[in-house]
Image (cartoon, rainbow, N blue to C red):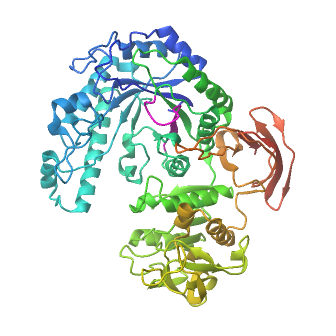
Amino acid sequence: MSLRFRQIHLDFHTSEHVPGIGSEFVAGEFVDTLKRAHVNSVTLFSRCHHGMIYHDTRFPARHPHLTCNLLAEQITACHAEGIRCPIYITVGLDEYTAQRHPEWLEVDENGRRSGAAPLQAGWHKFCFASPYMDYVIEQTEEVCDLFGDEVDGFFFDIIGQGGVFSRWCLAEFDRQGWDPADAGAQQAMRQLLVDRYRERITNAVRAKLKRPDLTIFHNSGHIYPNWRPTLWTYSHLELESLPSGGWGYAHYPVTVRYARTLGLDYLGMTGKFAKTWGHFNSFKPQAALEYECFNMLATGAKCSIGDQLHPGGRLDPATYQLIGAVYEQVEAREPWCDNVEGLADIGVFNIEATGREDGRVDSAALGAYRMLLERQHQYESIDGKTDWSRYRVVILPDKVLLDDALAAKVEAYVSAGGSLLLSHESGMDPGRTRFVLDCMPAEYAGALPFHPDFLLPLADQAAGTLPTPYVMYEPGLKVASKPGAEVLGEIWEPYFNRTWRHFVSHNHTPVRGRGEDPGIVQSGRVVYFSHPVFACYGKHGMMFYRDVALNALRRLLPDPLVLSDAPTTLQVTWNRQPAEGRSVVHLLHYIPEKRTLGPEYVEDVIPLYNVGLKLRASAPRRVYLAPGDGELPFVVEGGYVRLTVPEVRGHTMVVMDE
């Protein structure tokens, strides 16, 4: 089943101390508000983080101040107008049950139960090994029985396991024969418990409701590589990513480029809030919401916007005025955004598949994303299970260690004609003692003696840079170039490392002279950087890191899918609609700004004029702008379709009929 484009995730976490739950709900007004906002799917609540249930139930957790059979009335009203209604059920958090069964909570290595302190407001997290999971399944089965064919799907939330030291977990360690003191066994236990939950609850739902159009999603606020073995428990993927709520503007585009390789339909989820979930009467600018939704369309996703329903059950008109202004535009763009395939000539290895990520968005992944985005390159995020044959270049950024299977995959890819760009520890064995690739242009020789040191690019590697060595803020590896390899960059050394015994000026020691070690080496279709150049850009932002890495990429990919004279702020994303026989190139020009101590914001839509594009494609029958029908003249030369877009105001689509 294809997901709908214009969805609302309608949070409804409401304390048992709030009176009049649903007292202001009027079915006609509720649905009319959604329709005026162009909404065609809304996720509604069965059980929330407070543990409250919002419909008739045999369980004692029915909200004590519920004035009507709210969920049932919401579903009936929405279905009468053709609006889908997936049902929300909390899993990881339930305060009602936590107060009655504290023994079911997660326990950390110090014996502390998870969550808020006794005099602190906040949630408590459940142990997935405890009998609580039986309650989750029983309550879900009741929803299936109560609503039957009216159930469009389920959204299960807070799916993750932290502490694994409850008595339930320790018993499971014994059953598995694992040592609970071993960090690897602890991580394996987390994975086992979450996978077991997904399998149990998905099987329970599908046993009750045998419908192919039923949707099921298990939310963890991210899309993880370790989901692959249990992807069968998902009908689709939802990528929760509120830029204003702690995710930031890099999280969605980095993660969706992995999600879209997994073979399931998917949607992006942002929020209307100026900050994060549950902020009542809190609004971001319309331009920000446009950017977030249009970025979803550009990356092949459907759209979901988060809201929180007032306890009375009445939708806020101002919220849906804002959402409607955006969803009206989304609806107009849908014909060019459905059933798409992303085009990419570059695959970037997903750092999360290595287990070595250093944050919600890994610094090396961020650096690679920003480099490629700012020069309009088309890429996807890949792992060892992905088919690499569609990519002309694979990038292994900074810390992709290779076991035997992954090393064999890399060697086979290069042998079949692929090109490889890798940096720092990428290409080493898991013990980080040597490079394991025969195609590697360098040999490992230990750590570099100085940090920071400096890198001087040579020949065409210096294009766009100043004629001087640049400081490398992250430490590199000492390597020796293999016979026949070409040195593309030299490492220059400071007088000494900065210590309490000897230091110079405020930060680091200046250049003394050229060292003996290479910093960039190429052999055939493989280029290697001894420094973690991607993390350097992700952490420190000096444009030299981007430019020298992309100069190396140009050696491997002289004719990328997209070339443009646009500024680095223009995002270009290219999709195909095979069934329609056309390509759609999305141009987005919104600029997030860090104006205050709060989140980044997008307020102003700054137009670009006369944007030149070169798209590597055969001659199309017709090129036009969408929505609308503005024909674009073009010429075909050197394997590229060359054209000029008169204006990009926020979001523009260039359509090429093949």
Asked whether residue 416 appears in the rendered view, the answer is: no
Q: Is residue 636 left or right of residue 450?
A: right
- Determine which quarter of the picture holds residue 447: bottom left
Quarter assignment of residue 57:
top left
Q: Is residue 424 left or right of residue 459?
A: left
Residue 320 located left or right of residue 623: left
Name the residue located 52 percent from the left edge and 37 percent from the top edge. 270
Q: Relative to residue 30, is residue 624 depicted above or below?
A: below
Q: Position of residue 506 (x, y in %)?
A: 53, 73
Give left or right: position of 154 versus 315.
left
Residue at x 58% of width, y 26% of height: 323
Residue 453 visible to an observer of this rendering:
yes
Count of marks placed on residues: 0
Kindly identify the residue that appears in the image at 59 percent across and 87 percent down. Answer: 512
Q: Nearer the viewer, residue 590 or 395?
A: 590
Q: Please tell me whether residue 395 is drawn above or below residue 264 in the rendered image.
A: below
Q: Which residues are magenta?
A: 264-279
Whether the magenta-drawn stretch holds residue 12 is answered as no
**Main SS of residues in magenta:** loop
- Residue drawn at 45 percent across, 72 percent down: 408
Name the spot of residue 422 as percent of width and height, x first. 54, 71
Place residue 211 in its image quadrant: top left
